[in-house]
Amino acid sequence: MKWILLVLIVLNLGFGGYQYWQSTQPVAVVVTTALATLNNLQPTPNQVDRLQSSKQSSVTAPSQALPTQCIRIIGLVRGDSLEVVTSRLRALEVKAAEEPSQQVVKTDFQVILGPFDNLSFARAKLAEVTAKGIESYVITSGSSANALSMGVFSSNANALRKQSELVAMQIAATIIKKEHLSDGINLVVDPKSAALVSDDTLTSILSKFEKAEYLRYNCN
């Protein structure tokens, strides 16, 4: 009986010691494995560089504001092209505001002699050219006052011909361009509406009117 109790006690102590030893071993393995796993999760230097590069590239640089473009349409005539163009733009939901302007309605080319220092000198020159059979008159106002008008022409080519004739007669005439202005109306299209109409559409709208043309320009 004593031997049986002694054996049981030894077995219990041995089993308890084995359990104690076994319980200590996995903890070390788990800790070691966990540390190895954590070490493996640490990024390499190359990975760090790639991460930093991706962060920098993900930051979008502030975009520069594009120029805001308006449209100006010139060469329109009230009672004709102005109303037609305005109507066609309105049909496209394009808003256009009227803008007063000075427009060239006619251009002349005048052949002159002078101007001279004073009216008396101009009249004396007039007598000289009249004696040569050349029709002329004294200009009494404007930037060419006290000059002699030797002819007014609708084209520069005709004016050049007249000038050549006078040079052959030893009269040193010059040519000046005279623009005749009248009050006109331009149409100005704001940026929002300007984005709604293409260049091809504008060209088509204005093609029926000889002097009408358009210009896109930065208006921001």
Image (cartoon, grey):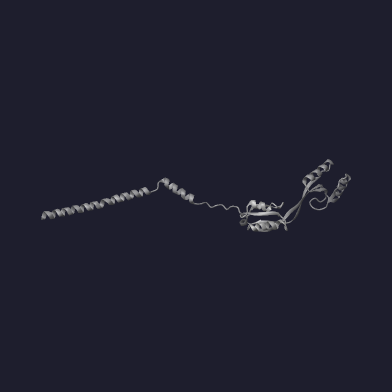
Where is residue 83 shown, x and y percent of the image? 70, 58
The image quadrant where one finds the C terminus is: bottom right
Question: Of residues 194 and 208, which is closer to you in this image?
Answer: 208
Q: Nearer the viewer, residue 82 or 58?
A: 82
| Picture residue at 36% right of the left edge, 47% below the top | 40
Q: Which of these two is toward me, 197 or 108?
A: 197
Q: Position of residue 68 (x, y in %)?
A: 61, 54
Residue appearing at x 42%, y 45% in the figure: 46
Left or right, 107 with respect to 2, comes to right
Residue 216, percent from left and from top = 64, 52
Give residue 177's position: percent from left, percent from top.
77, 49
* Tag count: 0
The N terminus sits in image quarter: bottom left
Image quarter for residue 189?
bottom right
Asked if residue 11 lies left or right of residue 32, the reply is left
The residue drawn where x is 73% and y is 54% is 103
